[in-house]
Amino acid sequence: AAEKQLRACVHCGICTATCPTYVLLGDELDGPRGRIQLIQNMLETDSTPSAKVVTHIDRCLSCLACVNACPSGVNYPRLIDQARAHIEKKASRPITQRLLRWALGQVLPRRSLLRPMLQLGRFSAWLAPLLPKQLRVLAVTASQLPRAHPENSSVQVATPGRRIALHKGCVQEVIAPQISASAMRVLRNHGFDPIIVDGCCGSLNHHLGQTAAADRHAKALVSGISALEQQAPFEAIVTTASGCGATMRDYGFQLEGQQAIAEKTHDIMDMLRGVPMQATQAHKGIRVAHHAPCSLVHGMKQRPAAPDILRNLGFEVVEPRETLCCGSAGVYNVLEPEIAGQLQRRKAGTLLELKPQIIATGNIGCLAQIAAAVNVPVVHPIELVDWATGGPKPHLRLS
C-alpha cells in the first residue's frame, strides 16, 4: 500500500502550502513532499531511521490537508502511518521519550487510568517550573483541559426511531461527558433510537505508531458493535469526536473485512443534516465561530454540517478563512509543544478576530486546545443544538 502511494507522488509541491509545519518552519523536510522522500528511503532500504528523519516525521500532525490538495490523489495516510510504525520498531528514542509515548498509549485510552492521572497532573501544575520538561508539559496540559461538569443525561422518552449506534470514546468522556448527554437527548428527541457503544477506537495508539495496541482496541470496538447488531442492524454508527470518526472510517483498510463498519460511520452533525428541528428563543442571535476539525474535513471527508444546522436554529454563525490545524492532533500538543503552541495561538487569533460569543468545534482535541487559548466558551455543536431545541444551557459565560 505504501509503495503504490510513493509511486503516485510526482513531487509537484502543491501540498506544501496546506501543510501547517511547512507554513510555520519553511523547511522542505517539514512538508509532505519532503517527508515522502524520507519515507521512501526509509521503507525501501528497511533502514533504521536517523534522529533527523524521526524528528521530521514526528513533526507531522496528520491533519491530512495535503490529501485534499494533492492533484495526483496520493493517499498520504498510508505513508505516514507506515512510517510511524516503522520508526516505532526500528528507531531508538531517548528513554524519556519512550516512557512518555508508552504512558500516553496506556493511559489515554483507559478512562479508569486517565481520571486519576489527570487529577495528579492538575495537582502537579503548581510545581510545573520545577519539573523536568516532559513532566512539565504534561502537568500544564492537564491543568488546561476542560473540567467535567455534572450533567443530567435524562432524555425525553420518544417513540422507537431509527436504530443507530452512538460511540462513546476515551478522553471526551472524562473531560466533557456532557457532550454525549446532549447527543443522546438530541437524537432521541428527533427520531433516532441511539444505542451506546463504549470503547476506544484505537486512534491515539495508531498515531503513536503503536500498531498492535491500535488494532486490539479497534477489534474490541468492532466486536462490541457486531454483538449489538445481532439483535438488529444499525442504520449508522455515530460519533461525537471526529478524530475517532476518521480512524473508524479507515477500518476497511486497517481491519480486513470491516468495510461495512467504516461506511456506516458518521459524524453526529452530519447525521442530523436535514432533520427538522423546532427551536426555542433563548439563544437567538448569539454569535458562534465554527472551527472545522481537520479530522472531519480531511479525515472523514465531510463538509461540516454544523454551520448550516446552527444557522437554521437561529445562531449567527461565522467561519474563519484560514483553515490550518489548531495544533492538537491527538497527543501532538504534548509531544511537540512548541509547534503546537504556535498553531494554537494562530488559530485562537483567527477565531477571536470574528468576535464570537461562543466557539464551536466537533472534536474534543480541538475543543481543549482552543479553549486553553481564548477567553470565550468553547463547546461542541451538539451542545448548542441541544440548548436550542429545549435542552439545558451549556456551561457558558456570555457577555
Image (cartoon, rainbow, N blue to C red):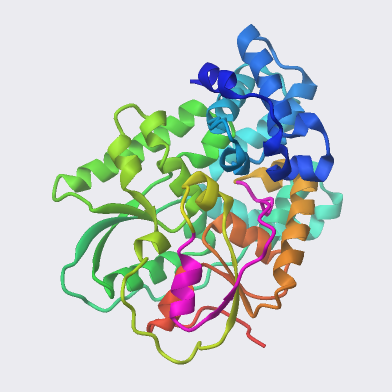
> For this rendering, which residue is in front, 323 or 200?
323
Q: Position of residue 318 (x, y in %)?
A: 61, 73
Residue 82 sits in quarter:
top right
Tell which residue pokes out farthest to the left in this image.
231
Instruction: Tell me how many marks there are.
Output: 0
Q: Is residue 234 left or right of residue 275?
A: left
Q: Is residue 260 left or right of residue 121?
A: left
Identity of the residue drawn at 51% across and 52% down: 296
* Above or below, 255 relative to 107: above
Tell which residue pokes out farthest to the right in this image.
129
Q: Is residue 151 magenta?
A: no
| Quadrant of the rendering where the C terminus is positioned | bottom right
Q: Is residue 321 magenta?
A: yes
Identity of the residue drawn at 53% across and 28% down: 78
> For this rendering, which residue is in front, 222 or 39?
39
Q: Position of residue 264 (x, y in %)?
A: 31, 47
Q: Position of residue 256 (x, y in %)?
A: 33, 26
* Above or below, 61 relative to 120: above
Q: Is residue 226 left or right of residue 63?
A: left
Identity of the residue drawn at 61% across and 33% down: 102
Residue 134 sits in quarter:
top right
Is residue 95 in view?
Answer: no
Q: Which residues are magenta?
A: 304-329
Identity of the residue drawn at 77% across and 58% down: 346
* Above or below, 297 relative to 211: below
Residue 148 sits in quarter:
bottom right
Q: Main secondary structure of the magenta part?
A: loop
Q: Position of residue 141 (x, y in %)?
A: 70, 54
